[in-house]
Amino acid sequence: MPADLRTLAVGALDQVVSNRSELAELWAEATNGPKWRQDITRLRDILDPPIPPQEETFFEI
């Protein structure tokens, strides 16, 4: 998927789960609400993978 479409998709997912989203509010009341949030997070992580933490330090500060 092109980078510009990934960016748009991530933005859309962020809006869907935001505190201002009526959809998120409705899912919060549903039995499967937590699974829905997990699925959205999984999709977001596929589109924009989180940066893994560095395990080794290259220099001391």
Image (cartoon, rainbow, N blue to C red):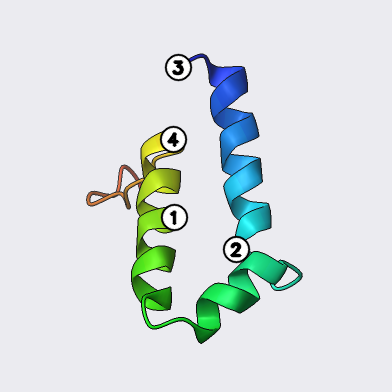
Quadrant position of residue 34 = bottom left
Q: How many numbered discs? A: 4
Mark 3 crowd level (few <14, some 14–19, many ≥20, 10 Å Cα): few
Residue of label 3: 1
Mark 2 residue element? loop
Q: Is residue 20 above or below residue 55?
A: below
Q: Which of marks 2 and 4 is in front?
A: 2
Residue of label 1: 40
Mark 3 is on which residue type? Met
Residue of label 4: 47
Residue 50 at least partly seen = no
Question: At which x and y percent is residue 2?
Answer: 51, 14
Q: In this view, does 39 lie above or below 32?
A: above
Question: At which x and y percent is residue 36?
Answer: 40, 65
Gap in angstroms between the C-alphas marked 1 and 2: 8 Å
The residue at 76%/70% (across/down) is: 20
Mark 4 residue element? helix
The residue at 61%/31% (across/down) is: 7
The residue positioned farthest toward the top in the image shown: 2
Residue of label 2: 17
Q: Do the residues labelled 1 and 2 touch (CB within 8 Å)?
A: yes
Q: Earlier in the sequence, mark 2 or mark 4?
A: 2
From the viewer's side, name the closer residue of 60 and 24.
24
Q: Earlier in the sequence, mark 1 or mark 2?
A: 2
